[in-house]
Image (cartoon, rainbow, N blue to C red):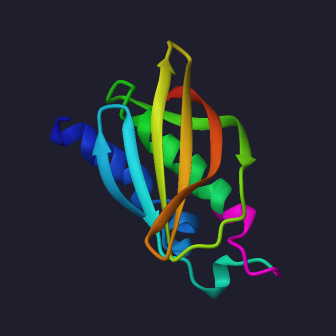
Amino acid sequence: MDEIRESRVRHIFNTANFVLDLGIELVRIEDEFCETVLVPVGRHKQQHGMIHAGVLATMADHTAGCAARAAVRLEQDVITVEFKINFLRPAVADRLRCRGRVLRAGKRLVICESEIFATRDSVEKLVSKATVTLAIKDS
């Protein structure tokens, strides 16, 4: 991936205040692929001690958005228009890792998927899977 494209992906990540407030970190960018991590703390949990669905949904959506941004032309950007997420098991974790990848980049839409893995006691398990549709817009 070229430096300009990588900087555009980092820009949409680093200017998303809510994502930064949650503590989600961008750790890997490749062509049509991004990976993020989060070390959960008390504020990320819901009343039963599991990672809140809103945290997982945000992580899945934004990671997919970064992957989609890497797939469009430099003068374009992307914005989520729809997503669906399945929570496959309770997310109780010392660390979350999300991998977002482009399934198809068209002229007007980019379709991505994101998978979130929870690591607890050195065991990693898939806890959610999302499909994210993003519209392509001129910057």
The quarter of the displayed image where residue 74 is located: top left
Q: Residue at 53% x, 56% y: name it.
A: 117
Q: Residue 50: within the magenta?
A: yes
In which quadrant of the rendered view does residue 71 lie? Answer: top left
Q: In the drawing, does residue 28 fall left or right of residue 85?
A: left
* Residue 107 shown left or right of residue 86 in the figure: left
Residue most toward the right? 47
Image quadrant where one finds the C terminus: top left
Residues shaded magenta:
47-55
Name the quadrant of the N terminus: top left
Vertical placement of residue 63 versus 39, above or below: above
Could you tell me residue 89's position as x and y percent?
71, 57
Spot occupied by residue 94 in the image (x, y as percentages of width and height): 51, 77
What residue do we see at 48% from left, 66% from top? 123
- Asked if 44 appears above or below 72 in the picture, the reply is below
Which residue appears at 58% of the width and 67% of the height?
Answer: 18
Q: Nearer the viewer, residue 92 or 60?
A: 92
Horizontal and vertical percent position of residue 60: 58, 50
Residue 3 spot, x, y in % from top left? 17, 42
Q: Nearer the viewer, residue 116 or 139?
A: 116
Name the residue furthest top. 107
